[in-house]
Amino acid sequence: MNLTSIKTSEKRPPLFGSAKELISISDDFEAPLEDFNNYM
């Protein structure tokens, strides 16, 4: 049995913006958390 490598395609540069709308941050992201009120 002979093992041969599988030729992979050339790496392309990342397409900036290709994951747009896959990740979202809520409007209150920077609002203080209630769990940390005792420390503030």
Image (tube, grey):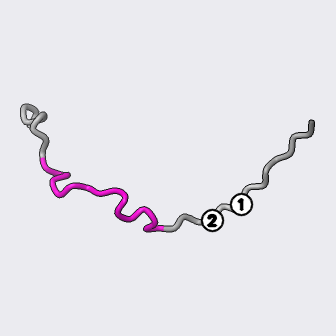
- Magenta span of residues: 16-31
Horizontally, residue 7 falls left or right of residue 11, namely: right
Q: Residue at x 34, y 63 (%)?
A: 21
Task: Please tell me whether the stretch drawn in magenta is mainly helix, strand or loop.
Answer: loop
Q: Quadrant of the C terminus?
A: top left
Identify which amino acid the numbered label 2 is placed on: Arg
Q: Which residue is mark 1?
A: 9
Query: To which quarter of the image does residue 8 belong?
Result: bottom right
Q: Residue lying at the far right in this picture: please name it.
A: 1
Q: Which residue is mark 2?
A: 12
Measure the C-alpha gap from mark 1 to mark 2.
9 Å
Q: Residue at x 20, y 52 (%)?
A: 29
**Residue 22 located within the stretch drawn in magenta:** yes
**Residue 23 located within the stretch drawn in magenta:** yes
Query: To which quarter of the image does residue 22 belong?
Result: bottom left
Q: Where's residue 11, x and y in %?
A: 66, 61
Position of 28 relative to 35 (above/below): below
Q: Quadrant of the N terminus?
A: top right
Position of 39 relative to 18 (above/below): above
Dot label at residue 24:
none
Q: How many marks?
A: 2
Q: Where's residue 19, x and y in %?
A: 42, 62
Is label 2 in a helix, a strand or a loop? loop
Q: Residue at x 9, y 38 (%)?
A: 34
Position of 20 relative to 35 (above/below): below
Q: Where's residue 7, x and y in %?
A: 78, 55
Q: Residue lying at the far top in this picture: please name it.
A: 38
Q: Residue lying at the far front in this picture: please name it.
A: 1
Residues packed near mark 2 inside 10 Å, few (<14), some (14 to 19) or many (20 plus): few
- State the residue in front, 3 or 26: 3
**Closer to the observer: label 1 or label 2?**
1
Horizontally, residue 14 falls left or right of residue 10, namely: left
